[in-house]
Image (cartoon, rainbow, N blue to C red):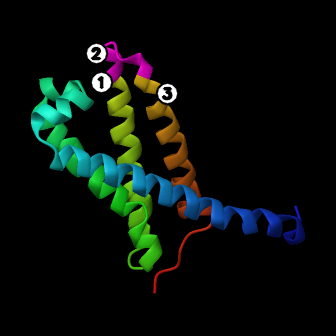
Amino acid sequence: MSSATLAPRRNLLGPGLWTVQSLLALFFVYAGGTKLSMSADQLAAMIPWTGDYPRLALVTGVADLLGGLGVLLPSLTRIQPRLTTLAAIGIIVLQVLALLFHLTRGEAAVVPMNVVLVALTAFVLWGRGRALPIQPR
């Protein structure tokens, strides 16, 4: 492909990556904030497994929050932007483990969400790791 053919793709790739990074950040910061700020009873009413595993809810809440911040802020600030790809790897690992956890509990209805989150995060990993990395300051 010539560079003229690749230019329209790059013009779409940048905004697409920023959009997906922002959506992932919103999702994971909200999920983490919810798990960390609600009482155990409120959280269990909303997310049933947290009643059985309150410590796991705390750990995943912290991981969600850090992943959500990490998938966007390093790229946005251009301070250590390679951390975005590391956060993406962490999110993918977390979602694969969540998918397996839900399958073992018979909660297959939430697995498609895990699959979508893995796919979106893999796009960010590829985009910021290889296709259109952010240069540090």
In reply to whether residue 104 is colored magenta, the answer given is yes
Q: Residue at x 55, y 55 (%)?
A: 20
For mark 2, what is the residue? 105
Residue 136 position (above or below residue 102)? below
Residue 101 position (above or below residue 8)? above
Q: Main secondary structure of the magenta part?
A: helix
Circles 2 and 1: CB distance less than 8 Å?
A: yes
- Which numbered dot is residue 112? 3
Q: How far apart in space, not on screen, are marks 2 and 1 (Cα)?
A: 6 Å
Q: Earlier in the sequence, mark 2 or mark 3?
A: 2
- Which numbered dot is residue 101? 1
> How dense is the environment of label 1, judged by Cα within 10 Å: few (below 14), some, or many (20 and up)?
some
Q: Nearer the viewer, residue 80 or 108?
A: 108
In reply to whether residue 50 is colored magenta, the answer given is no
Q: Amino acid at mark 1?
A: Phe
- The magenta region covers 102-109
